[in-house]
Image (cartoon, rainbow, N blue to C red):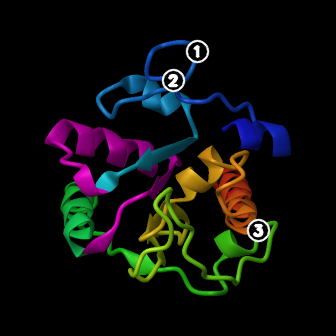
Amino acid sequence: MQGIGRLTRVDAAAVDIDGNGGRLIQLDDERVFDYPWLYAVEVGQWHLDDDEARLLREYLDRGGFLMVDDFWGDYEWEIFVDSMRRVFPDRPIQELGEDHDLLHVLYDLDQRTQIPGRGGQRAETPHWRGIFDDNGRLMVAINFNMDMGDAWEHADDPWYPEPMTALAYKFAVNYLIYSMTH
């Protein structure tokens, strides 16, 4: 969020689980409706209960946007899908095509390169997927087999590859603009 604050005029605050000024929202908290954009990591470990699934569905149906990131492989994919089926049993997860607005709202992002986590590139194929509402609006942006959060977090670390950080920030800006305009 520090980078988004630097690169845009979005009111961005970093998450701080120690309570020192960040924004951390649980899916059992009605304050979720105060935020138009949510970012969730390690969703391959999610086990949403009925109340969390209901609240997330209501949030998304009201126009909220969720971006998920940093989960890898078939095992974590299945865990995530199980939770999302609780949220949207009636909506499929779809691959985002090269022409989707999300990939072109400001930056043209036709480079489908895996954004590595702290541990580096992995053998898994990266996927940009989503869940859409009845009008074709992307409600859930799914970054699978990649870790954009690490690219943002380590942007100022000289050991992390700068081209990956730059690409991850372009995705972040596109996601934010898309979520605020669609």
- Give the x, y percent position of residue 125: 43, 83
Mark 3 vs mark 1, CA separation in Å: 31 Å
Secondary structure under the numbered disc 2 in the rendered image: loop
Indicate which label's residue lies in the foreground, 3 or 1: 1
Earlier-in-chain disc, 1 versus 2:
2
Number of labelled discs?
3
Residue 150 part of the magenta-drawn span: no
Task: Name which residue lies at 47% across and 78% down.
Answer: 126
Q: Amino acid at mark 2?
A: Asp
Task: Name which residue lies at 60% across and 79% down.
Answer: 113
Quarter the C terminus occupies = bottom right
Task: Name which residue lies at 36% across and 61% down.
Answer: 71
Q: Report if the CB atoms under discs 1 and 2 are less than 8 Å apart.
A: yes
Q: Which residue is mark 3?
A: 105
Quarter the N terminus occupies = top right
- Give the x, y percent position of residue 65: 52, 51
Secondary structure under the numbered disc 1 in the rendered image: loop
Question: Which region of the structure is painted magenta?
Answer: 44-73
Q: Badge 3 local density, few (<14 within 10 Å), some, or many (20+)?
A: some
Tell me if residue 8 can be seen: no
Residue 61 part of the magenta-drawn span: yes
Disc number for residue 11: none
Q: Is residue 84 above or below residue 109?
A: above
Image position of 154 (left or right of 138): right
Earlier-in-chain disc, 3 versus 1:
1
Q: Which residue is mark 1?
A: 21
Q: Is residue 113 above or below residue 88?
A: below
Q: Badge 2 local density, few (<14 within 10 Å), some, or many (20+)?
A: few
Q: Is residue 182 above or below residue 30?
A: below
Q: Which residue is mark 2?
A: 16
